[in-house]
Image (cartoon, grey):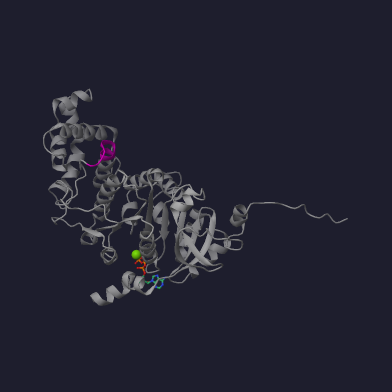
Amino acid sequence: MKLAPSAHRVTTAHLQAVYPFVCEGGLGKNGVYIGQDLLGGAFIYDAFELYEQGVLTSPNMLVAGQLGRGKSAVIKTLCLRQLVFGRQIVIMDPKGEYAPLARFCGGSVIRLEPNGSVKLNPLDARIARHDQLRLLNAVCAAVLGRPLRPQERSAVEAALSVITAGRRKPTLPLLVAALLEPREEAATSLVTDRATLTEWGREVAFELRRLVSGDLKGMFDATTTKGIELDAAFVVMDLSAVYDSDALGILMTCAAAWLHALLQRGTGRKTLFVVDEAWAILSNLAIAKWLQASFKLSRSNGLQNIAVMHRLSDLAATGAAGSQQERVATGLLSDAETKVVYAQPHAEIEATAKLLGLTATERTLLPLLERGVALWKVGERSFLVRHHMGATEADLVDTDFRMVRAR
Ligand SMILES: Nc1ncnc2c1ncn2[C@@H]1O[C@H](COP(=O)(O)OP(=O)(O)OP(=O)(O)O)[C@@H](O)[C@H]1O
Ligand SMILES: [Mg+2]
């Protein structure tokens, strides 16, 4: 006797997880057009919309791919198309390639360079106290190249309290001075003496001096320049002047943490916060931790963090199994439920497949993807998408053309 297998019912969401591509019904109609779902119709995506529908529990996004595959192009057009829906766009731009787009949209470009005309004050009065402390911790960790020790954190907090209570507007030079020569009351507040408190804060103060009087001075060491426009719909932080500096990671962190802290005040708008070339800030554990914390925080703040990098293994490269680095990498991956993966070299396939839990089909496809085609993992679902651009968009995002012209 032949037994007929009993019928098995599953939701389409579960079926899609088992058979990616094959039974995909798209992500709905609400959102911006990205391009062609190569196994379906138009591919529409909006993290905020999907978050509200409960499809995603986190709006954050990671984009990875080899050089010149179209990572920045897809982000540029996503941003441009999101403007129509009233979203705000804020970009960390280490290569200086987003300015034409910002100008096209009537946005603002903040160009950061040593001793340039723009200064950003990490102790800006517009930033709430607890965000100031978070920002300071990120800045200190960036210059130290490691997380702060508990005594150091206490010394920084005490110094911040002293200068906040003073008559002058708090700035990094005042903080460094307060760390190097702590007041009696700061020591008392920590139940210690001045000599011990000086010891706790000395290394932090010396490293912070790089931003105050050393090679990185003239960007974060005074009150914020008047007229810096953060209310514009499209804001670009152009870091191209320091792209070749070995301190790029430090400066990117200071600037990103400053922007993030100001954005935490809530503008009432949904915001896309893009960190292009994010490898520069992921290479340092302390900074990667800041990014991870920001990824977590933004869920409730209407912020979609987008980190663009070459390899997903940039996240985990430095970490042995079970190490802090590995935990941070895993945390970042789980807090970014949208992963957009362009072609990867063969050497990267294993790591990528492991980090993303790719199926055998996805793994085979990955090295073969052409420019402009990416694997989109949105929650548990997978799409193969060819990104489409209009003629005006293509002109605005064409980095190759810019390079040819510059030559
Ligand atoms: N979907 C696409 N259709 C046509 N051209 C594209 C597409 N995507 C990208 N390009 C072109 O490819 C070039 C490189 O793209 P892009 O700058 O986005 O690459 P990238 O992955 O960000 O590279 P890098 O890692 O160097 O930053 C650009 O000139 C862009 O116009
Ligand atoms: Mg790019």
Up/down of 195 relative to 302, above or below: above
- Please state the horizontal and vertical placement of residue 88, each as a whole percent of the image: 33, 54
> Which image quarter is the N terminus in?
bottom right
Q: Is residue 208 shown left or right of residue 259?
A: left
- Please state the horizontal and vertical placement of residue 267, each as a whole percent of the image: 31, 47
Q: Residue at position x 16%, y 31% from top?
A: 165
Magenta stretch, residue numbers? 126-133
> Which image quarter is the C terminus in?
bottom left
Q: In what quadrant does ligand 2 lie?
A: bottom left
- Please state the horizontal and vertical placement of residue 239, each as a whole percent of the image: 24, 59
Up/down of 112 relative to 179, above or below: below
| Residue lying farthest to the right in this orientation | 1
Residue 192 visible in the current orientation: no
- Foreground residue, 136 or 197? 136
- Foreground residue, 240 or 100? 100
Q: Residue at position x 42%, y 54% from top?
A: 61
The reply to whether the magenta stretch includes residue 201 is no
Residue 393 visible in the current orientation: yes
Location of residue 197 (image quadrant): top left
- Foreground residue, 158 or 296? 296
The reply to whether the magenta stretch includes residue 132 is yes
Q: Total marks drawn?
A: 0
- Foreground residue, 252 or 283? 252
